[in-house]
Image (spheres, rainbow, N blue to C red):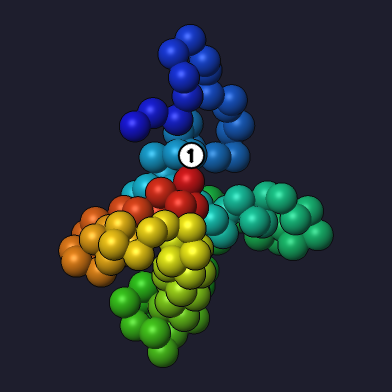
Amino acid sequence: LCPTSQGEWLPLNPDFPADIFTSCLTTPIPIALRWFVHQTPLSTQGLDLDTIADAIPGKLTDRKTPLGELNWIFTAITDTIAWNVLPSPLFQRLFRQDLLVASMFRNFLLA
């Protein structure tokens, strides 16, 4: 998997990692938050883009925390998109049989 075709170059922005595609695959919630804050100028007043994800309290694995709830919402949205787009056997194989594979495909949908 590559973010560009042969001969194409990734656009660079100093506010984001050099490879947003890979960042979406490895750290989807932090990059999504940074992207949203960057795309919504009114929400960036007084916020540091580099630490926006660190400012949200909680753990990704604990749904009772704000960060955990964001992760739960992300999972629900990406699973719903996959459920509506993929044939049922493929959805079951990619999103229900292996937790690691499911996580990577959710992150791929974000990318």
Q: Which residue is mark 1?
A: 20
Residue at the farthest top position: 7
Left or right of 37? Residue 88 is left
At 48% from the left and 10% from the top, the residue drawn is: 7
Q: Quadrant of residue 106?
A: bottom left
Given residues 13 and 11, the one toward you in this image is: 11
38 or 25: nearer the eye? 25
Q: Can residue 64 be seen here? A: yes
Q: Is the residue 98 above or below the residue 2 in the image?
A: below
- Say above or below: 41 vs 77: above
Q: Single out the residue that lies furthest toward the right.
A: 42
Amino acid residing under circle 1 = Ile
In the rendered image, which quarter is residue 64 located in?
A: bottom left
Residue at 36% across, 73% down: 60
Q: Position of residue 26 (x, y in %)?
A: 34, 49
| The image quarter in which residue 32 lies | bottom right
Is residue 54 among what the camera can see? no
Is disc 1 surrounded by few (<14), some (14 to 19) or many (20+) residues within 10 Å? many
Q: Quadrant of the N terminus?
A: top left
The mark total stands at 1
**Vertical comparison of 23 with 73: above or below:** above
Which residue is depicted at the point 31% across and 53% down? 104
Whole-percent x and y of residue 77? 51, 69
69, 88: nearer the viewer: 88
Q: Secondary structure at mark 1?
A: helix
Q: Considering depth in this image, is 21 or 106 the residue closer to the camera?
A: 106
Question: Which residue is most to the bottom?
Answer: 64
Q: Position of residue 17 (x, y in %)?
A: 48, 37
